[in-house]
Amino acid sequence: MAELKVSGITFAYEETPVLKDVNVELHEHELVSILGASGCGKTTLFHIISGLHKPRQGKVMLNGKDITGCPGQISYMMQKDLLLPYRTIQDNVSLPLVLKGESKRKAREKVSLYFEEFGLEGTQKKYPRQLSGGMRQRAALLRTYMFSRDVALLDEPFSALDTLTKSEMHRWYLDVMDKIHLSTLFITHDIDEAILLSDRIYLLTGKPGRVTEEIIIKEPKPRKREFNLTEEFLGYKRRILERL
Amino acid sequence: MKRKLPNITSKLLPVADVFLLLMIWQTASSAGVIPGFLLPSPLEVSAAFAEDFPLLMDNARVTLLEAFIGLAAGILIGFVTAVLMDCFEWLYRAVYPLIVLTQTVPTVAIAPLLVLWFGYEMLPKVILIVIVTFFPITVSLLDGFRASDKDTISLLRSMGASKAQIFRYVKFPGALGAFFASLRISVSYAVVGAVISEWLGGFSGLGVYMTRVKKAFSFDKMFAVIFLISAISLILMWGVNVLQKVSMPWEEEDR
C-alpha cells in the first residue's frame, strides 16, 4: 500500500515553469531520495508536497486522502535546522505537539522519551546555539519526527555539515531509522549519500524539472559502513552519473 | 582570560570619568575660577540636595507616577499598533507616515496646548509621554516582526500553525531584543517628557520644582534636581537591562 502518492505535479513561479508532470511514490518504511542538481525544483516539490504551495496541476495523496495544498499533514524538515534560538531543545522539539494543542508539560514528557534514542540526552535544557551543528540537526530531526510518525520530508538535512560530521550523521541516521521505521522522502544533491541511504532514487533533471529515472538500490538494510567501497555501489554511482 | 580585563575597565571607566569631572569642577569652584552665582560647586549642589531631600522625593514621586502611567500606555498602544500594522499591509501604508509625522512636532510646542485642552492635572502629561514613547516601541516592534525568518514561518505553517501561533512562537519572541532596545530609549523619554510637561503647567512634580527654583535663582537646587532626573533615568534604564536579562535567558553567555 502506497503511503504517499504524488502524481502529475506541474508548477510555475509566475511565467517560469519549475516542475513538469512529476510523479513520486513513497511506500511504508521506505527511504526514497530525490537526486538532482541545484535549482531543478527539488525544494519547490517539497513545498508542494507539504502543502505550502499549491501546484498548477497534480495531486498529493496521503493514505488515500487528497491533501493537495493543505499544510499540517506531513513532517517537513528544511535545509537549515531552523531551531528557534529562544527555546530550549526540549521546547523546540515539543513545538509540533504544542501547536497541536498539547500542554507544555505533557509535550515535554512525551518528547523526553526520545532524547536517548536520538543521541540527544543531556541537551534538554540547552539552547540551540550551545549545540554543535550535528546535534542541532539531530534535534531538528527529532522535532520533525514528533510532528508525524507517517511521512517525513527531509530537504538536504546533512548538507550544511562538514564531511566527517556528515558521515557520522549518516551512520547515526541509518541506525535511528532502523529503530523508528519512518517513511522518508529525502532531497539531496550528494550521489554517495543518496545511494548509501535510499531504497530507491528518483533523478530529477532539466528545466522545468521532471523525473527522468527511478533507480532501485537492492542492498539490504541495515547497511554496513563499507557499502560505499563495494563494486555494487560504484555501479549505481556510474549509472546515476551517466543519467545526470 | 584576556577578555576579562577590558570588561572590568570598561565598567569602571565611565564612573572614573564622572568622578574626575566632578573633581575638576569642585577644584575650579573652590579656587574661584567659576563664580558661585553662575555655577554652584558640586558640594553646594549636594548640600542643596540634602536640604530639599523630602521635597525632591515628593515631587519625584509625582513625576515617576506620570512617567510610569504614560510609558505603560505608550507600550500598550505601541504594541497594538505594531501588531495591527504587521497584520494588515494597507493599515501600515495608511498609518505609518502619520506616526512619523507625530514625531516631527516639537514636544515643547504641543505641551501647552495639551494643558489648555486637558487641564493642569495628570492627563495632559500622560498624553505627552504617550506621544513621545510609543513611537520607538512601535517602530522597533514592527521591524522585529517583519525581520522574522521566512523559512521558520514556512516551517511552522507546514506544521499547521495558525497565524496567532506563528505570532506567538516566532514573531513575538524574535522581536523581543528590538523591543528592549527601544524600551531603554522610551524610559528616558518618559522621564524627560514628564518634566517638560510639568514645566508648562502643573501643581507638583520635578518640572514644577525646577521652574520654581529657577525663578528663585537657586542654581544649586536647580543642579540638584538635574542630577536627580539623570539618576532616575539611569536607574530605570538599568532596570530595563535587568528585565531583559530575565526575560531573554537564551542571550546569556554560558558556554
Image (tube, coloured by chain):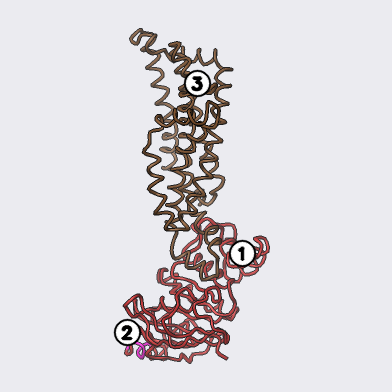
Chain colours: A red, B brown
**Which quarter of the figure has residue A243?**
bottom left
Front label number (2 vs 3): 3
Q: Main secondary structure of the magenta part?
A: helix
The reply to whether discs 2 and 3 touch (Cβ–Cβ < 8 Å) is no
Give a yes or no on whether discs 1 and 3 share a subunit: no
Q: Mark 3 points at which residue?
A: B208
Res B226 quadrant in image = top left
Do discs 2 and 1 share a chain?
yes
Q: Is residue A118 above or below residue A178?
A: above
Residue type at tag 1? Val
Q: Which tag, 2 or 1, sits closer to the chain's start?
A: 1
Q: Name the residue under label 2.
A: A206
Question: Does the magenta portion include A239?
Answer: yes
In the rendered view, tell whether residue A53 sits above or below residue B208: below
User: Residue B107: which quarter of the image?
Assistant: top left
Write the residue at 39% across / 39% down: B103
| Residue picked out by circle 1 | A98
Residue that appears at 54% across and 14% down: B52
Left or right of residue A93: residue A16: left
C-alpha distance separating marks 1 and 3? 53 Å
- Residues in magenta, as a range: A237-241
